[in-house]
Structures are given as structure tokens and as C-alpha cells.
Amino acid sequence: MTVPDSDQVHQDCICGDCPSYPANDVWSYCARGKSDKEIERVNCICPECPVTDRYDLVGTYYCKSGAAD
Ligand code: SF4
Ligand code: SF4
């Protein structure tokens, strides 16, 4: 499902706690799309995020693969 680029999503996003997260980057990748930064895939925590439940997301590593669709 498409995720809106909303204030609620940004507040709920937990990318900042993820070991893959690059410092000083935007987050809410499932809504905004992939990062411009180099990212190593390590234990994506998207499945633990409330946004995953809310929008029935099934993916991970949106920071690498782009927004949920
Ligand atoms: S599902 Fe992942 S990218 Fe989307 S808001 Fe949650 S932690 Fe951030
Ligand atoms: S999209 Fe997943 S892997 Fe990427 S920073 Fe967010 S929680 Fe981590």
C-alpha cells in the first residue's frame, strides 16, 4: 500500500533506531523513497514500526529499495 508523506508517518518512523540508518538523513523511506546515501543492510526494523501495521506493509529496507507500493 502507498504510504503518505505525512507528519504522522514521520513521527512514528523508527528508522533512527535502526543499525542500517545513515546519520543525518531524512527518514520515512517507505513514504519518501530510497536514500541518496550508501547504506549497508543490517537488521531493518520496519516490521516493528507502527506504520507497517497501519498500511499493511510487507517489505523492508525501503531506504535501499524505495517507497512501498
Ligand atoms: S516502515 Fe520503516 S521506513 Fe516506514 S516509517 Fe516505519 S521505520 Fe520508517
Ligand atoms: S528502511 Fe528499514 S533498513 Fe532502512 S533505515 Fe529504516 S528501518 Fe532501517
Image (cartoon, rainbow, N blue to C red):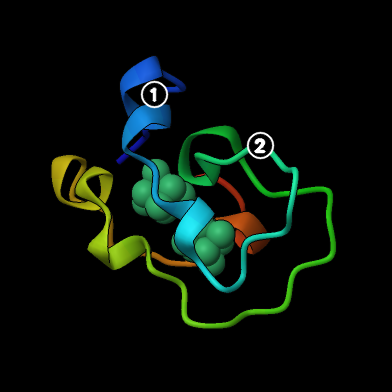
Residue 48 image position (x, y, % from top left): 24, 64
Local crowd size for mark 2, using a 10 Å CA cut-off: few (<14), some (14–19), many (≥20): some
Q: In the shown orientation, is residue 20 left or right of residue 16?
A: right
Q: Mark 1 belongs to which amino acid? A: Pro
| Callout count | 2
Looking at this rendering, what residue extends furthest in the bottom direction? Answer: 42
**Nearer mark to the viewer, of 1 and 2:** 2
- Reading the image, the residue beneath label 1 is 4
Residue 48 in the image: above or below residue 23:
below
Rendered image quadrant of residue 12: top left
| Residue drawn at point x = 49 percent, y = 54 percent | 15
At horizontal 84% and vertical 65% (from top left) the residue drawn is 38
Question: Between 42 and 55, which is closer to the camera in this rendering?
Answer: 42
* N-terminal-most mark, 1 or 2: 1
Q: Which residue is mark 2?
A: 26
Residue 55, given in percent of the width and then of the height, sits at 21, 41
**Which three-letter amino acid code belongs to the residue tagged 2?**
Val
Query: On the rendered structure, is 29 left or right of 40?
Result: left
Asked if residue 69 can be seen in this view, the reply is: no
Q: Which mark is residue 27?
A: none
The quadrant of the image that shows the C terminus is: top left
**Helix, strand or loop at mark 1:** loop
- Dot 2 falls on a residue whose secondary structure is loop
| Mark 1 crowd level (few <14, some 14–19, many ≥20, 10 Å Cα) | some
Residue 1: percent from the left, percent from the top? 30, 41
Task: Using the numbered discs, state the Cα–Cα distance from disc 1 to disc 2 in whole angstroms.
Answer: 15 Å
Q: Is mark 2 within 8 Å of ligand 1?
A: no
Q: Nearer the viewer, residue 68 or 42?
A: 42
Instruction: Left or right? Give the position of 46 relative to 24.
Output: left
